[in-house]
Amino acid sequence: MFLFFSVSAFGVSAKSMQCSYDNIGNSVPTILLRMQKRLYTEGGLKAEGIFRINPDNAKEEYVRKQLNSGVVPRGIDVHCLAGLIKAWFRELPTGVLDVLTPEQVMKCNTEEDCSRLVTLLPPVESALLDWAIGLMADVVEYEQFNKMNARNVAMVFAPNMTQMADPLTALIHAVQVMNFLKTLILTNLKEREDAYAKSRGINKQTSDPSEEWGSHDSEILGNNIKPSNNPKFLRVSTLCRLEADNEEEFWNIEKRHDHKDTAETIGTVQRLSKLSKSTKKPLESNKDEGRRGREAWGSRLSSLPW
């Protein structure tokens, strides 16, 4: 059990409560941080209509008593937790945005105007607002599950951030506060995206340049082969493939040369064969003529009177 400075967790000033720092350095009541943590662990960010759906009154009263005693019960309904977070802001002695006049809020039309207006808040109210905006931005990041965009979340939180006696004035002011909160939520989300993109850029610059082989290797290996994520493997396999291609090209050239040489050799043999055939007949005819000449000369010699 965790005890707070105040006897009650609701309806008292944040200055009289035990405070802790959140993940960005805001000093806020510890009970808010504990409810936020339980809301997240119980899957509240993905619950459809979170912060919009009203919880069961009996459950909310039971959990309220537990929170006043310093206990955040387990297995609690996430809509009950979300409703009690809104109730905590609504039941403050003074609203978080009561320091700002309706005219000041109404004139906020840009991100710069809203950011400049936040600087007018006292430290306690400024920390509470910054924590609440971070919570709302977390909800919006899960919009695909909870169906709560920046406008919807700002709409359900706006009436809990100010306190006005006149209902009509409070309603009109709530619309202006809703637009103010919506702008702050979108600014917060944009800052997160910028910080994430910057961190990715730094990581990319400091990473191993061999990782760039991954995109080229997919073209070399083919579309049907899934490349490895190991840069060293990609580099080695690519070089091996290039060496294999070069070797294959070399042997193709050798084969072409061999084929050319063979063709030339065959042509030479064929020419020699034709030449030998063409010269064979004259040689044979000369031999016959010599034989016939010797026979004729011999017959003449035999007819002479010796």
Image (spheres, grey):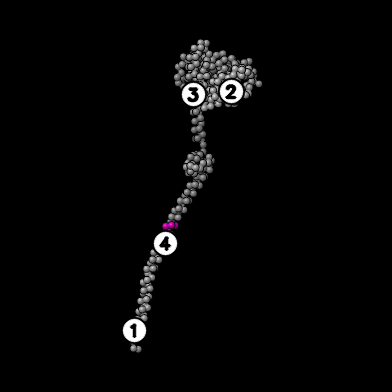
Q: Is residue 284 magenta?
A: no
Camera-side mark, 2 or 3:
2
Q: Nearer the viewer, residue 30 or 202?
A: 30
First along the sequence among labels 1 and 2? 2
Say which residue appears at 51% left-offset and 41% top-offset: 226
Q: What residue does disc 1 label? A: 300
Mark 1: few, some, or many residues within 10 Å (few <14, many ≥20)?
A: few
Amino acid of disc 2? Val
The local secondary structure at tag 1 comes to helix
Quadrant (top left/top right/bottom left/bottom right) for the N terminus? top right
Instruction: Look at the magenta stretch and give its main secondary structure.
Output: helix
Mark 3: few, some, or many residues within 10 Å (few <14, many ≥20)?
A: some
Q: Is residue 17 visible?
A: no
Q: What residue does disc 4 label? A: 266
Q: What residue does disc 2 label? A: 78
Q: What residue does disc 3 label? A: 186
Amino acid of disc 3? Leu
First along the sequence among labels 1 and 3? 3
Mark 2: few, some, or many residues within 10 Å (few <14, many ≥20)?
A: many
The local secondary structure at tag 3 comes to helix
Q: Position of residue 181 (x, y in %)?
A: 50, 20
Say which residue appears at 49% left-offset and 49% top-offset: 244
Amino acid of disc 4? Ile
> How far apart are the two marked residues, 1 and 3, measured between alpha carbons?
135 Å
Amino acid of disc 1? Arg
